[in-house]
Image (tube, helix red, strand yellow):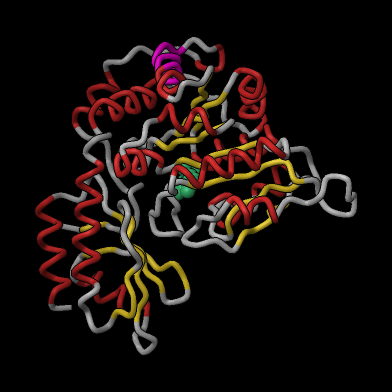
Amino acid sequence: MIIDLRSDTVTKPTKGMLDAMITTQVGDDVYKEDPTVNALEMRLAKMFGKDEALFFPTGSMANQAALKLHTNPGEQVICDKYAHIYNYEGGGASFNSGISCKLIDGHRGMFTAEQAEASINPPDFYHSPLTSLIAIENTTNKGGGAYWDFEALTRIKEVTDKHNLGYHLDGARLWNALVATNETPKQYGELFDTISVCLSKGLGCPMGSVLIGNKELMQKAVRVRKILGGGMRQIGYMAACGMYALDNHLSRLEEDHKKAKAIAETLSKLSKIKHVEPVDTNIIIFELNDDVNELEFINKLKEKHIYIIGMGSNKLRMVTHLDYTDNMHEMVLSILKDF
Ligand SMILES: *Cc1c(COP(=O)(O)O)cnc(C)c1O
């Protein structure tokens, strides 16, 4: 048995999800004739109190489309130095939208309204790129699954209003933040112009992300998705997984968070480990002592059939998820205790 804690994307569809998939109705979604996709999009738009939602194959494509909706070539997006849109989307911001990122040196992937406002280039100073967007990530991936204080997000919204900037949320793991804080999707819908959410992470779908926003922006989103090659045909089979996951896999995220906290507690007692970052949701990031070799540590765990991943600079990551069972959890805790 392999215990795969590299990411919450390694999950496989459950029996219930597979059943939902094969019994659903599909059509050609490029003609907007897939009833399951239409239902999923409408459900998510309503859930967030927005006009429209659009199904994408990946979270990267949903974010990339959002960047394009908010910017023109040569302009600039403000984000944290840990942001997924900057670190992990293959340079897509510059490739697809011709924009640059102004990085904020934040804390665990999060920053303040003051930092955001100080990063805006004066619009009449034509030597600098024109700032057109602020992008937030919640929870933060490289920041160790941290969630934002909602008040801080509201204060940044005041900055975007004052300076007439777009406000995008990369909510790949927003579900984890919602479950951990008891905040509602509508609260987020009121704040942000666009929100991307992943179905293929904590919710356990094989693929799919959804971009949510109001009509004016979202009308353009269909064309941008087409340009990026993301117009899909009978994709309702995948949307059915999303519907099933929203019904069945949302509130259980709490279990993932509990397990992650227990792993962190065990790790913090190990002599080989210098520091374990605070665990807010389902991601555990920890740093090894300087004299411990990262690759050796990973391979030693691999010998015990536990897979984890390196994040660079002697930091390692574990992520709990739907396929990480109670049994596996007991095994991991007992293996780690004498590691
Ligand atoms: C996973 C992730 C995405 C999307 O990734 P895909 O692999 O393209 O679906 C976007 N943002 C964050 C913060 C993520 O963790």
* Residue 272, magenta (yes or no): no
Split into 4 quadrants, where in the image is the N terminus?
bottom left
Residue 143 placement: quadrant: bottom left
* Residue 40, magenta (yes or no): yes
Q: Residue at x 23, y 44 (%)?
A: 254
Q: Residue at x 54, y 42 (%)?
A: 60
Q: Nearer the viewer, residue 154 or 76?
A: 154
Q: Main secondary structure of the magenta part?
A: helix
Q: Residue at x 52, y 24 (%)?
A: 54
- Tag count: 0
Q: x, y (%) of residue 197?
A: 45, 36
Q: x, y (%) of residue 133?
A: 67, 42
Split into 4 quadrants, where in the image is the C terminus?
bottom left
- Residue 219 as seen in the image, left or right of residue 337: right
Vertical side of 259 occupied by 15: above or below: above
Q: x, y (%) of residue 139?
A: 42, 48
Q: Nearer the viewer, residue 102 or 310?
A: 102
What span is colored magenta in the figure?
A: 34-42
- Residue 171 as seen in the image, left or right of residue 90: left
